[in-house]
Image (tube, rainbow, N blue to C red):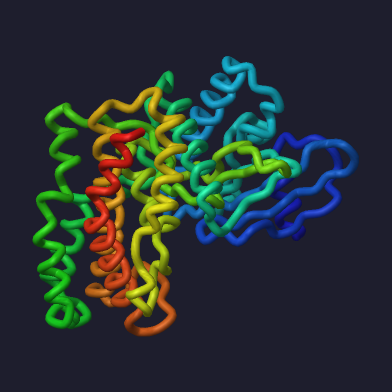
Amino acid sequence: MEKLNTIIENFALEGNIKEIKPLGNGLINTTYAIITEGDNDNYVLQCINHNIFKDVDLLQKNIELITTQIEKKLIEKGETDIKRKTLKTIPTKDGKLYYFDGEKYWRVTILIPDAVTFESVTPDLAYQTGLAFGDFQYMLSELPEPLGETIPDFHNMEFRLEQLDDAIEADAAGRVDEMMEIIEEIDDRREEMCKVQELFREGKFPKRITHCDTKVNNILFDKDGKILCVIDLDTTMPGFVLSDFGDFMRTAGNKGKEDDTDLKAVGIDMEIFKSFAKGYIESAGKFLTQIEKDMLPYGAKLLTYMQTVRFLTDYLNGDTYYKIQYPEHNKQRTLAQFKHLRSIEEHEEEMNKFIASL
């Protein structure tokens, strides 16, 4: 705790510190709450995972651009309580957006008071989440300067397939033969799943600013259940709107678990799909092109296919990326994701009709 105090002293905080305690259960960054005395703001101190976010300068510049733009748009809309609806970074005493202690990188933001998050999704929360992420993209659709890629090729389907091809050729864990059936299924869909990259190169599909981690627990709500803001901005970068729409359908839109051992439990929840789509198009429809709207169900397929590829690649490589709880964990994840993909394909016509009705 003494080391944390030394780090905190480098930031331009107000008030005397009363307590420092661990905050949340994030998988990427280590986070602490800084509680101050009296009516001063409380703060969030975070150690940035430099193994994942290798260019911290770019990362923090991105976040400053994002939060400044959101603040500007909220003011233009006549919103109140702006401080609770943005995630402004608190600079160091020498004006930097982060502090480097010689080994690790640290940043501080205001701890938004009286905010709640939710872990499980209901149709109403899916609708609210769609509204929130659609509005988030809308507010960032006219940034004064471009953002950089904090994780290059994160949602690049062609890149993920190249990684799979390398894993098949190397066969490092001797698992290719047992997975050949699903490898062939993935190969059958290869051309279709790279379609959006081709459309982008032809100038027919735009890149936007996307969050890339569209989960309900990445939204803060007030005590009355009203949306405050989208959080966890590290992966916010240029991408296709299909990524944000599709990632929510891959996770929250799945009736089963990501690694479900009961494949019969896995499949698309159409009630969640319709609720999220309704909220998303209500807020994002102000800037989306027709092709972006039309391809939203394709986005659900794309991100589920992509995650199938990533789990399979890791299994073939000998489980070098994702943490596993048992030897065939990544194999089960692959099978569950593929089952979810098949379910989305079976409901695609229904999805397309619903999107058209909006």
Q: How many marks?
A: 0
In the displayed image of the protein, which residue is found farthest to the right?
38
Residue toward you, 65 or 247 = 247
- Asked whether the viewer can see residue 153, the reply is no
Above or below for 295 versus 333: above
Residue placed at 70% from the left, 59% from the top? Answer: 22
Q: Tell me where residue 240 sits by quadrant.
A: top left
In the picture, which quadrant includes the C terminus?
Answer: top left
Q: Tell me where residue 295 sits by quadrant.
A: top left
Residue toward you, 319 or 55 = 319
Q: Is residue 264 left or right of residue 95?
A: left
How far from the left and from the top, in percent, is residue 168? 14, 70
How far from the left and from the top, in percent, is residue 277? 40, 41
How far from the left and from the top, in percent, is residue 94? 65, 31
Q: Tell me where residue 282 sits by quadrant.
A: top left
Q: Is residue 325 left or right of residue 67?
A: left
In the picture, which quadrant includes the N terminus?
Answer: bottom right
Q: Is residue 82 left or right of residue 231?
A: right
How far from the left and from the top, in percent, is residue 75? 61, 18
Residue toward you, 280 or 140 = 280
Above or below for 150 versus 162: above
Residue placed at 16% from the left, 71% from the top? Answer: 182
Residue placed at 64% from the left, 58% from the top? Answer: 24
Residue placed at 29% from the left, 46% from the top? Answer: 351
- Asked whether the viewer can see residue 278, the reply is yes
